[in-house]
């Protein structure tokens, strides 16, 4: 059996008549057996195609073949080329295949019956294989992030997470260091230590280093890694709290980006800082009204133990500066408010270098990891004032929660350091299971962080 994927923009004799009108709609698939071949007609339906559209076409094609037998597959790209404005064929193939491999993903570790079929792409011209390969590498990195997010909290604890990262980066150019136990206390990781106190799972701080080109300025990626967020003493009461197994989505995005940087041989000087904790409440838990002293001398009053993300990220940001990073990008499932502000399609991007925000928005559009520029109004510092310490981790205002969270983080960034913050609480899952998205986590942030690192590295 051979499978051929044929994009169409108008009906032909093969297509059943009553379907004629809709058969050319974007993403509409019809499987037509023809002798020894199965033809996959997929509608283009648009005069122009974005990169995300092309990834979606790959993803939709693959999903429609989940029940097909193992087979060799070929695809025709001329119509896509035409509608995409004739970019490089290699780029089109890479995008299509990225969607293909992302759609192939299943999280089936705990299913007795997992089925998947082997579909192997055939390339007439051997030189095209490298673009397929590049897509595979990219999708594998996103799928690593998806895997980490999809793991339930009893399987992915800070300890097993750190072990997993050691394995993942074994024999790569990325070195893995784990700081834990007394070292967290003696090295002044006060936020990480404090948040983890109420859990029997010990905190881990994982540091991933990729110093391929040490002549470049160091970039730090800091990812929130709360393997479960119960809210702590300010316990969460909502019904969907199982979602909080994905409160490590920021750290997963960073891990995926590091894998992509490593596997694609990118010349970069990057350090990833991943604070991993579980936010629970037992007799040792931190309490509202507690005060935390950070390594830079700032004291934070805990107004709410459910605003734990910013407490551990503050340690990450301070450590990034201690390690000499000149640019810091942090990413976190930080606030429910970001979803109220933006809905579920785009994460929020914040920075102390506002002029660059539209550039990140553009990188998001290219990669499919959509972000939208958000403000960091210094005036709102008023809402973070504390009677007891320098700042409160909880805003006194019910409004603009994502902005006050960002502003809290900004207090730990030194003036000359470029800082970018991505709040992805609303995008850790896909907003709709369309295109190449499958049940479970989206894998958001991997491709965006990768492009951001490349773009920053190109400037330094
Ligand atoms: N992990 C949550 C944010 C979150 C909410 C992620 C929904 C994914 C989906 C975070 O730690 C949190 O609890 N934030 C609080 C902050 C508040 C207490 C200031 C929130 O958003 O309500
Ligand atoms: Mn929380
Ligand atoms: Zn959280």
Image: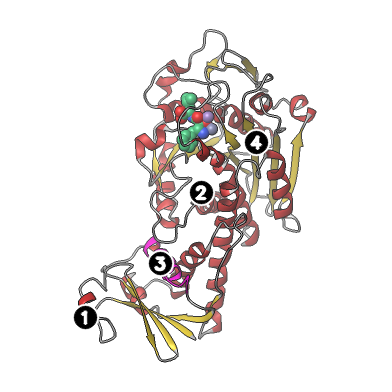
The location of residue 440, given as percent across then percent down, is 50, 51
Query: As drawn, is 304 to the left or to the right of 55?
Result: right
Res 352 seen here: no
Distance from label 1 to label 4 (Cα)? 58 Å
4 or 2: tag closer to the N-terminus: 4
Distance from label 3 to label 4 (Cα)? 36 Å
> Residue 377, relative to residue 421: is it above or below?
above
Q: Which residue is mark 3?
A: 60
3 or 1: tag closer to the N-terminus: 1
Which residue is depicted at the point 45% across and 70% down? 62
Helix, strand or loop at label 3? It is: helix
3 or 4: tag closer to the N-terminus: 3
Which quadrant holds residue 299?
A: top right
Q: Which residue is mark 1?
A: 17
Q: Which residue is mark 4?
A: 275
Query: As drawn, is 395 to the left or to the right of 173?
Result: left
Name the foreground residue: 282 vs 82.
282
Which stretch is magenta?
Answer: 52-67
The location of residue 272, given as percent across then percent down, is 64, 44
Q: Which residue is mark 2?
A: 445
Res 90 seen here: yes
Name the foreground residue: 188 vs 426.
426
2 or 1: tag closer to the N-terminus: 1
User: Is the CB of the residue bearing disc 2 within 8 angstroms of ligand 1?
Assistant: no
Query: As drawn, is 317 to the left or to the right of 431?
Result: right
- Could you say which disc has been placed on residue 103 in the image? none
Distance from label 2 to label 3 (Cα)? 21 Å
Helix, strand or loop at label 1? It is: helix
């Amino acid at each position: 059996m051979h499978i051929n994927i044929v994009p169409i923009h108008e009906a032909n004799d093969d297509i059943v008549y009553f379907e004629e009108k809709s058969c050319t709609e974007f993403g509409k698939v019809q499987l037509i057996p023809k002798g020894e071949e199965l033809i996959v007609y997929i509608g283009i339906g648009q005069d122009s195609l974005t990169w995300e559209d092309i990834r979606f076409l790959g993803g939709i094609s693959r999903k429609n073949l989940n029940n097909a037998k193992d087979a060799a597959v070929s695809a025709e790209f001329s119509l896509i080329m035409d509608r995409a404005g004739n970019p490089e064929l290699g780029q089109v193939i890479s995008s299509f295949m990225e969607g293909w491999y992302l759609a192939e993903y299943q999280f089936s570790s705990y299913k007795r019956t997992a089925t998947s079929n082997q579909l192997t792409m055939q390339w007439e011209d051997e030189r095209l294989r490298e673009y397929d390969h590049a897509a595979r590498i990219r999708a594998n990195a996103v799928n690593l992030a998806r895997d980490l997010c999809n793991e339930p909290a009893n399987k992915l604890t800070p300890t097993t997470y750190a072990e997993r990262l050691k394995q993942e980066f074994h024999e790569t150019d990325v070195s893995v260091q784990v700081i834990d136990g007394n070292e967290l206390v003696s090295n002044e990781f006060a936020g990480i230590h404090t948040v983890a106190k109420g859990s029997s799972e010990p905190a881990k701080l994982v540091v991933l280093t990729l110093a391929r080109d040490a002549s470049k300025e160091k970039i730090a990626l800091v990812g929130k890694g709360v393997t479960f967020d119960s809210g702590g003493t300010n316990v969460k009461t909502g019904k969907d709290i199982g979602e909080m197994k994905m409160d490590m989505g920021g750290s997963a995005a960073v891990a995926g980006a590091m894998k992509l940087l490593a596997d694609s041989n990118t010349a970069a000087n990057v350090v990833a800082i991943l604070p991993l904790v579980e936010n629970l409440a037992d007799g040792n838990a931190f309490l509202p009204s507690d005060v935390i002293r950070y390594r830079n001398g700032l004291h934070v009053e805990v107004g709410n133990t459910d605003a734990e993300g910013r407490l551990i990220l503050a340690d990450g940001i301070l450590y990034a500066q201690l390690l000499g990073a000149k640019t810091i990008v942090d990413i976190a499932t930080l606030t429910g408010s970001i979803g109220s502000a933006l809905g579920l399609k785009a994460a929020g991007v914040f920075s102390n270098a506002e002029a660059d925000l539209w550039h990140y928005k553009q990188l998001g559009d290219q990669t499919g990891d959509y972000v939208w520029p958000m403000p960091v109004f210094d005036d709102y510092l008023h809402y973070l004032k504390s009677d007891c310490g320098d700042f409160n981790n909880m805003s006194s205002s019910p409004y603009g929660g994502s902005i006050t969270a960002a502003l809290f983080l900004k207090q730990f960034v030194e003036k000359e350091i470029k800082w970018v913050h991505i709040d992805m609480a609303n995008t850790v899952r896909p907003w709709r299971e369309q295109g190449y998205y499958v049940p479970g986590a989206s894998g958001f942030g991997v491709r965006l962080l990768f492009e951001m690192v490349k773009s920053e590295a190109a400037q330094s």
